């Protein structure tokens, strides 16, 4: 049975949620079997993180729960900012109650001192729905043993990176720490294992590492259903190594951009049809990207199954299942330039090879796209891609390396054609699919991002990169 996360009609109240097949039953079963058995059930289900990494959820919970620290924390990552992705916002609009119940179950299982849900402040509709759900469930006594704090954060891409997410919750800028949350968690004061100590743990509490679980909105939304129906039910869907369903976003050159819940193992081509209405009339799919975090999936691999191992086998990654589709009218040099510019602008600058390298790559792609590039630009670009990841403390530099290199490798003729003609052979806009809204088959992209500067300020109008910016 697929389609349990996205109901056909939004759940508008806690009473409506309790009237569903599983509303409240997951938490009831968790309290009956206890924390350890709850973690074992999630582990047995094979649930993997839906935020992009695909890490086994039960293993993450068990790892933090087993640590001896007096204080542990739980964070729900709802800072959805991956281009082409809208599934977390769709879930919050459709049924925020399942997320809150999943959060309470996780807090109970890991025995945390506090739980946080972090969203971008610009997600006004989702924040309203989530706040109302938390308040209703608190009034009903569902959240009485777990303090839930909703955090409104900035629009920066790195807000969604789990180490930077903790910084924002602590009131700082989204600059990734050196060590992961299970080693250096919220309000940690052990400066030797992190970027810096927070310097302000909760009043009356001794400092420490404070190991922290960070789970995605979709991941936690699965939890109450698994506890209510059992691990075997969850494993009856999907594949052996990627069980369950996945909420896909499909945007770009498609007939009807949208979000759909499908079983893992579904062919990518079918997911594009289900969630996006297929390609535009008389057009053929040319390339698909899972956000800007993984190498391109080319046309010969459109039947790849939506599963972590299957995507890895074709040289890409499932990511957060947010798919940006480009058809046969798209210029792949321009696509690579847009992606590279996004990553350059969003890079925080803590790691100089990342900031400088992504900027150098963007500048050279810009030259090639404009028809002023040379073979030297290609050589310089390849050289920077080799070293852009030197010393990186987050995955952004790896994304730059993987995505741009995959385009150069998959579409070398397009790069060469730009140099031959001295112009773009396929001039057409290729807007970055950074989604502001997605509803009724219409995608609204962020029109402000082309004005965003590398220092995270904004200019008055879109600007091209220059040598002076590097």
Image: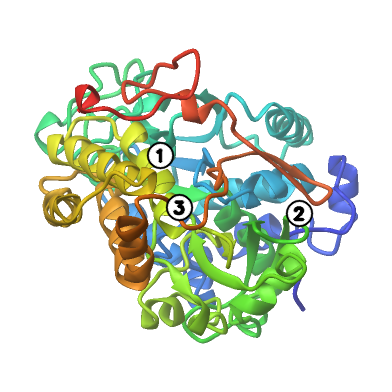
**Residue 131 left/right relative to 446:** right
Mark nearer the viewer, 2 or 1: 1
State the separation of the CA atoms marked 2 and 1. 41 Å
Q: Residues within 10 Å of mark 2 (few under 14, many from 20)?
A: many
Q: Position of residue 31 (x, y in %)?
A: 62, 57
Q: Residues within 10 Å of mark 3 (few under 14, many from 20)?
A: many
| Nearer to us in this view, 71 or 387 | 387
What residue is drawn where x is 25% and y is 56%?
401
Above or below for 33 versus 1 = above
State the separation of the CA atoms marked 3 and 1. 11 Å
Helix, strand or loop at label 3? It is: helix
**Residue 13 left/right relative to 286:** right
**Residue matched to label 2:** 24
State the separation of the CA atoms marked 2 and 3. 45 Å
**Residue matched to label 3:** 335
| Nearer to us in this view, 46 or 54 | 54
């Amino acid at each position: 049975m697929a389609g349990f996360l996205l109901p056909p009609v939004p759940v508008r109240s806690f009473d409506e949620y309790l009237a569903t097949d599983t509303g409240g039953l997951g938490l009831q079963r968790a309290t009956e079997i206890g924390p350890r058995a709850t973690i074992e059930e999630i582990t047995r289900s094979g649930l993997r993180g839906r935020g992009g990494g695909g890490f086994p959820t039960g293993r993450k919970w068990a790892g933090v729960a087993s640590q001896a620290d007096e204080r542990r924390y739980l964070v729900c990552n709802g800072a959805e900012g991956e281009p082409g992705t809208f599934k977390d916002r769709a879930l919050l609009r459709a049924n925020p109650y399942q997320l809150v119940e999943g959060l309470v179950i996780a807090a109970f299982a890991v025995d945390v001192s506090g739980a946080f849900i972090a969203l971008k402040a610009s997600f006004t509709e989702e924040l309203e729905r989530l706040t109302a759900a938390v308040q209703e469930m608190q009034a009903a006594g569902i959240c009485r043993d777990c303090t839930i704090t909703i955090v409104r954060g900035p629009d920066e891409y790195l807000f969604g990176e789990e180490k930077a997410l903790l910084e924002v919750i602590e009131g700082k800028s989204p600059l990734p720490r050196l060590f992961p949350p299970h080693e250096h968690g919220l309000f940690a004061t052990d400066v030797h294992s992190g970027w810096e100590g927070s310097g302000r743990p909760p009043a009356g509490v001794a400092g420490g590492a404070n190991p922290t679980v960070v789970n995605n909105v979709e991941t936690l939304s699965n939890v109450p259903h698994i506890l209510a129906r059992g691990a075997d039910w969850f494993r009856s869907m999907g594949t052996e190594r990627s069980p369950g369903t996945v909420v896909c976003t499909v945007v770009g050159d498609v007939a009807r951009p949208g979000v759909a819940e499908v079983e893992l193992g579904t062919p990518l081509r079918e997911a594009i049809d289900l969630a996006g209405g297929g390609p535009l009339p008389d057009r053929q799919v040319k390339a698909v990207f899972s956000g800007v975090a993984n190498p391109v999936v080319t046309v010969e691999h459109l039947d790849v199954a939506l599963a972590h191992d299957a995507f890895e086998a074709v040289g890409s990654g499932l990511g957060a299942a947010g798919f940006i589709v480009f058809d046969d009218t798209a210029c792949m040099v321009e696509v690579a330039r847009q992606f590279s510019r996004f990553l350059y602008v969003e890079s925080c600058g803590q790691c100089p090879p990342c900031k400088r390298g992504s900027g150098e790559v963007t500048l050279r792609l810009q030259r090639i796209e404009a028809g002023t590039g040379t073979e030297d630009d290609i050589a310089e670009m390849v050289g920077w891609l080799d070293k852009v990841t030197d010393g990186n403390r987050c995955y952004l530099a790896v994304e730059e390396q993987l995505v741009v290199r995959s385009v150069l490798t998959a579409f070398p003729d397009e790069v060469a054609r730009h140099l031959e003609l001295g112009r773009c052979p396929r001039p057409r806009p290729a807007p970055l699919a950074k989604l502001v809204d997605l509803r009724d088959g219409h995608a609204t992209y962020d029109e402000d991002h082309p004005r965003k500067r590398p220092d995270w300020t904004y200019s008055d109008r879109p600007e091209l990169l220059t040598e002076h910016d590097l």
